[in-house]
Amino acid sequence: MGKTSAESKNKYRAKAYDQINIVVPKGEKEEIASFAKIQGKSLNGFINEAIKEKIERDNLEKK
C-alpha cells in the first residue's frame, strides 16, 4: 500500500528542513502573524526573514 500525501510531505520536510519551536507571550503570535500578513508573508517566512536580517545586521556591526 502506498504512502499518503501527508506521510510523503512529512518525510520530505524531515529530510529538507530543521525545525525550531518558539514560545511567545499569549497574544503575541497573533500580533506577529498580522504584521507578517500586512507584509505579504507567511508567519514562518516572516520569522525566517527577521532572523536572517538580525544575523546580517549583527555581523556587520562586529566588523
Image (spheres, rainbow, N blue to C red):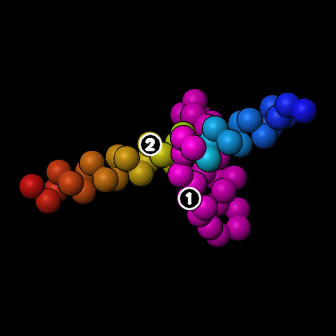
Q: Residues within 10 Å of mark 1 (few under 14, many from 20)?
A: few
| Magenta highlight range | 15-43
Q: Nearer the viewer, mark 1 or mark 2?
A: 1
Quadrant into which the N terminus falls: top right
Give left or right: position of 28 versus 47.
right
Q: Residue 6: x percent and y percent? A: 80, 37
Residue for badge 2: 49
Tell me which residue sits at (64%, 38%) in the image.
Answer: 12
Q: What residue type is labelled 2?
A: Glu
**In front: 18, or 32?**
18
Compared to residue 58, the image places residue 13 above or below, namely above
Tell me which residue sits at (71%, 43%) in the image.
Answer: 10
Tell me which residue sits at (17%, 51%) in the image.
Answer: 60
Q: Which residue lies furthest to the front in this view?
A: 1
Quadrant into which the C terminus falls: bottom left
Q: Residue 17: x percent and y percent? A: 54, 45
Q: Residue 46: x percent and y percent? A: 52, 42
Is residue 53 on the magenta stretch?
no
Is residue 36 visible to the viewer in this orientation of the structure? no
Give left or right: position of 39 versus 56.
right
Give left or right: position of 30 versus 16.
right
Residue 3: which quarter of the image?
Answer: top right
Local secondary structure at mark 1: loop
- The label shown at residue 20 is 1
Local secondary structure at mark 2: helix
Q: Earlier along the polypeptide chain: callout 1 or callout 2?
A: 1
Is residue 42 visible to the viewer in this orientation of the structure? yes
Q: Residues within 10 Å of mark 2 (few under 14, many from 20)?
A: few
Give left or right: position of 34 versus 49.
right
Q: What residue type is labelled 1?
A: Ile
Q: Residue furthest left?
A: 63
